[in-house]
Image (cartoon, rainbow, N blue to C red):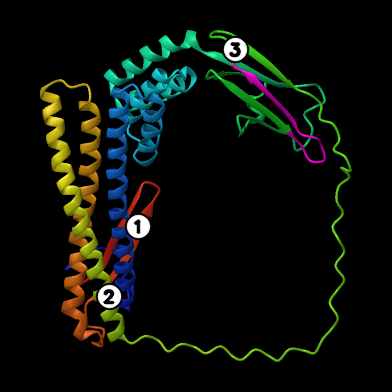
Amino acid sequence: MAFLIGKQAHGSTSCALIAAVIASAWAASAVAQVPDAALAESLFREGKRLSGEHKFAEACPKFAESYKLDPGLGTLLNLAACHESEGKPASAWAEFSDASARAKREGDNDRAQLADEHVRALEPKLSHITIAVAPGAAIPGLVVKFDSRELSSAALGMSIPIDPGKHQIEASAPGKQSYSQTLDAPAAGATATVTVPLLQDAPNGAPAVAPVVAPAAAGPTPPAAAPAVTEAPTSDGAKSHVAVIASGVATGAFVVGATITGILYSSKRSDFNSANSEQDPSRFDKRDSAKTLGTVNLVLTGGALISAGFLVYFLATGSHESAPAQAAKLQVIPDIGPTGGGLTLRGTL
């Protein structure tokens, strides 16, 4: 039975063993994503609870961490709304702008309209700062930071929206004294301008000279290294044994992951259906959570089937590894791309 047209490989056990190990690692990685999704959901729910109690300073970090673990559009919108309620219009404006662009890419017109309305409402409330560099101050190695974040040269001279409160501007360069200034954000609609001056030379700021290291005195010639001992190749029987174990571990990991995500998906789907029937505003968040878990469950279920197939194959052929060329030949090739990965089977049975 031909799986795919291509060159048949000799030493099929070695190729299949590599594939089984890759499948095991893939399973472990996929299962590891399940706790992240669960933690993201727990953080999101805690953020919603704290927001409902108007504890925005505590709620916003929960939403931020949830979005870091599982960057859903609904979580981003909740984070933006939290920052808006917390009194951080610049942070909220940036997040609503990002959410609007993302919703438009995904064809979610309702959320795009919601985000655009908040962007327009926040723009008059924004304070701005412009950080410029004095003539002659833009020396090689100059680093300008705003609130500990390094600014690129393209950002210098531009108007930057900022949240209310105190902000710090720092500048440094090799062999120069550092510059630092703290200022309060201006009133809503106003712009503060800060000019980084020409940095002064640091005391004793001459470039350091690397010490000259004297060559070590010649000593006796070390004895020649002993020839490396070549490890005996693993027997076909040992390879088969390891392949069975690796594919068994992969199958077990996939099954566990598929079971957990299947249960979570069923629960999330039920929550979405209930919220959708009641036109609950949180139905979009529940839909995204269910969709993510459904995708992960589908991947894990497919992985379980593939790794189980490997396990059956290894168990069926383990006692015939020393058969001549007439035995089945199978080549397993990892297929890894920028958006995912998988395995390609080539050869015949």
Between 103 and 185, the residue placed more toward the observer is: 185
Q: Is residue 323 magenta?
A: no
Nearer mark to the viewer, of 3 and 1: 3
Instruction: Examine the image and state in which quarter residue 53 appears.
Output: top left
Quadrant location of the C terminus in the rendered image: bottom left
Q: Are marks 3 and 1 in contact (CB under 8 Å)?
A: no
Direction from residue 331 to residue 95 in the image, left or right = right
Residue picked out by circle 3: 186
Q: Label 1's element?
A: strand
User: Which badge, 3 or 1, comes first in the chain's sequence?
Assistant: 3
Q: Is residue 345 above or below residue 51?
A: below
Name which residue lies at 26% across and 81% down: 241
User: Which badge, 2 or 3, comes first in the chain's sequence?
Assistant: 3
Q: Is residue 302 above or below residue 152?
A: below
User: Which badge, 1 or 2, comes first in the chain's sequence?
Assistant: 2
Residue picked out by circle 2: 243
Residue picked out by circle 1: 335
Q: Label 3's element?
A: loop
Range shown magenta: 172-185
Label 3 is placed on what type of residue?
Pro
